[in-house]
Image (tube, grey):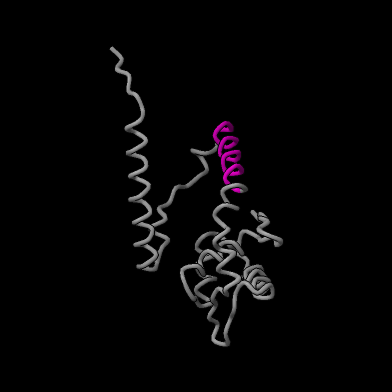
Amino acid sequence: MMIKIKIGEDRFSSPQIALLLKLREGENETRKLLRTMWRFGFRSRSSFYAALSELEEKGYIERDEYGRVKLTGKGEELVEKIPEAISSKIQPLINYVSFIMEKAGIISRRIEYRSIADEIEDAEELERYHRYLLEELKKVKERLKKWRRIKVE
């Protein structure tokens, strides 16, 4: 599914957003970026390179002759704006699609749940994911404390 998100004066495709967020973690090789995109369902090599080239033309990333890619200063500024843009544009769409799939009765039949941990190959990335999950569990515990429980006799 291709979604365009406007941030500032430019519009970015979902693969471009994913690439920028991955590069926030640091410099990366083109082939590793492609492999990462592949793991998460992006299957078009030509679209991957087109997305990369467009980001480079707009000055958000730099590529060297060895295939290493990194964010520019302009790219780093853009990446800081992405979370807000995503939450305001994509989350309502996710909620809407989830509602439709649930009401149509296809969520339990067609969605295959997989562990994200199985998809992460980098140890540092897996550690970040672990810390993120621990923080999410803390939020769940706090929220559960606020709920009233009613005993049924």
Q: Going by the picture, which residue comes out furthest to the bottom?
A: 65
81 vs 32: above or below = above
Does the magenta portion include 111? no
Dominant secondary structure of the magenta stretch?
A: helix
In terms of depth relative to the viewer, which is nearer, 14 or 116? 14
Could you tell me residue 108's position as x and y percent? 49, 38
Q: Find residue 130 and report its image quarter.
A: bottom left
Could you tell me residue 55's position as x and y percent? 65, 71
129 vs 57: above or below = above
Q: Find residue 9 and report its image quarter.
A: bottom right
150 vs 142: above or below = above
In the rendered view, does 6 fall on the left or right side of 152? right
Q: Going by the picture, which residue comes out furthest to the top?
A: 153
Residue positioned 51% across, 66% down in the render: 22
In the rendered view, does 152 fall on the left or right side of 78? left
Q: Find residue 152 and report its image quarter.
A: top left
- Over which residues does the magenta segment extend? 90-105
Could you tell me residue 102's position as x and y percent? 54, 34
Residue positioned 55% across, 37% down in the render: 106
